[in-house]
Image (tube, rainbow, N blue to C red):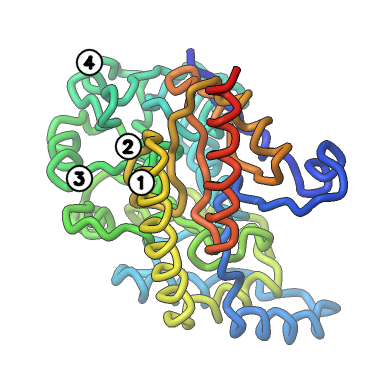
Amino acid sequence: MSQPDYSGGLSLAEAQALVGDREIHRMSSNENPVGTSQAAVDAMVAAAQGISIYPPRTDAHLRSQIADLHNVDAAHVYTGLAGCEVIELAYRALTAAGDNFIVCPPTFGLYYLMAKRYDLTLKEVPLLPDTFALDIDGILAAIDDKTRFVIVINPNNPSGTYTTDTEYKALLDRLPEHVIVMADEVYFQFVSAPDYPATTDLIRNGANIIRIQSFAKAYGMAGLRLGYGIAPPQIAEQMRGLMRPFHVNSIALQGASAALGDTAFVAKTVASNEMGKDYLYGALDAIDVRYWKTEANFIMVECPVSSAEMTDRLLHKGVMVRDPKDAVIPNCIRVTVGTQVQNEAFVAALTVILGELKGN
C-alpha cells in the first residue's frame, strides 16, 4: 500500500528552526500567493466586531449563494469545516465498518486516514503510469457489494493531471448503483482544459456524485477552514443532518459570502497561476527536469534522488516543497506555483542542487 502522508507538512516556524535565520519560501501547501480577497477580509473584520453574538443557527444564506454559483438548488449543498470535514461527513453518513472504497494513487493522504478512522478497507487502483489517467477497468474490477466510494481527485493531487469528461462518463456508465463517486475538485477554478467534466451538471441530472469544494485554494482562505459539497439532495440532506447548530462561525460565514461575490479576485488568482506555470515550465525545460503539466496550482517534479532527500535539500536552501511520501512516486516532489520571486527562488535552488548532485 502506498500510504501517502497526511501530516500537513512543516510550519514556517518549524522550518525556520531547522535552517536558521534565512528567508524561506513556502511552496509546500498550495496556498494562494495572491493572498485573500480584500472584500472578504473587510467582511471578516466587520464580523469580528459582533462575535459576542451567536451566528445564525444554519448556513442557509451561504448555501443559497453557493447554489446560485453552481446553478443548483440549495438542497444539493452542504457545508463543513474545510474540504476535509466535507469529505469526512460522507464517510460518517454513508459507510459502516467493513465497507470499502477505492483510491487511485498517487493521491491525497486524507483518504487513508478515513479508512483507519471508520474501520474501512481501502483498495488501491493506481493511476496509469506516466499519464496518471484513471485505470477504469481496474476500478470496475475492484468493486464489490461492500464498495461505497470511488475517489476521483480532479485535478489530481499530487500529479496535477486531470480526468477528462469522456473518461468520467465511461466510469459513471459502468458503475453499480450502490457506488458513489467522490469528486474531489478543490482545485477546479484553476482548470483551463476544455474537456474537464461538468460534474455539477451530472449531479443535477441524477448522477451518484458528491463534489467536494473548498475556500482554501482559489479564494485564499486556507486559515478559515471552510468547504462545501454538492450532491444529490437526498445525500446532501443526510450530511446536513449531522450538523450541530451554529456549525459555521460568524466570521467564516461573512468572509465566505464576500469571497463568493469577489469574482475579480478569483480571476486575478487564476491569471497569476497561469503566468507562474508558464514560467516554471520554461525554466524546468531549460534545466532538463521532468515535470507533468498541471491543471492545478502546483506542479509535480521528478528528481534524481528520493523525494525526501530533495525536499530536505531544498529546505536548506530556503524553499519549502511537499514530499508526497507516496510509494507510487518515490522520486517526485510537489511544488506550489508561487509568486515570481518564489518561483525563481525554487528554480535557482533546484539548479544548484542538481549541480551539486552531478559533482558527487
Residue at 59 percent across and 37 percent down: it is 352
**Mark 4 near mark 1, Cβ–Cβ under 8 Å?**
no
**Mark 3 near mark 4, Cβ–Cβ under 8 Å?**
no
Residue wearing tag 2: 180
Q: Nearer the viewer, mark 2 or mark 4?
A: 4
Please give left or right for residue 177 compared with residue 54 in the image.
left
* Above-or-below relation of 7 to 286: above
SS class of the residue under badge 2? strand
Residue wearing tag 3: 164
The answer to which quarter of the image holds residue 227 is bottom right
The front one of 327 and 54 is 327
Task: Give the Cα distance between marks 2 and 1.
Answer: 18 Å
**Mark 1 near mark 3, Cβ–Cβ under 8 Å?**
no
Amino acid carrying mark 2 in the image: Ile
Task: Give the Cα distance between marks 2 and 3.
Answer: 18 Å
Task: Give the Cα distance between marks 1 and 3.
Answer: 10 Å
Q: Is residue 106 at all visible to an observer of this figure?
A: yes
- Residue 23's x, y, as percent? 76, 54
Disc with the residue nearer the chain's start (2 vs 4): 4
Circle 1 packing at 10 Å, graded few (<14), some (14-19), many (20+), is: many
Question: Which numbered disc covers residue 141?
Answer: 4
The answer to which quarter of the image holds residue 320 is top right
Question: Which numbered disc covers residue 155?
Answer: 1
**Mark 2 near mark 3, Cβ–Cβ under 8 Å?**
no
- Residue 62's x, y, as percent? 52, 73
**Mark 2 near mark 1, Cβ–Cβ under 8 Å?**
no
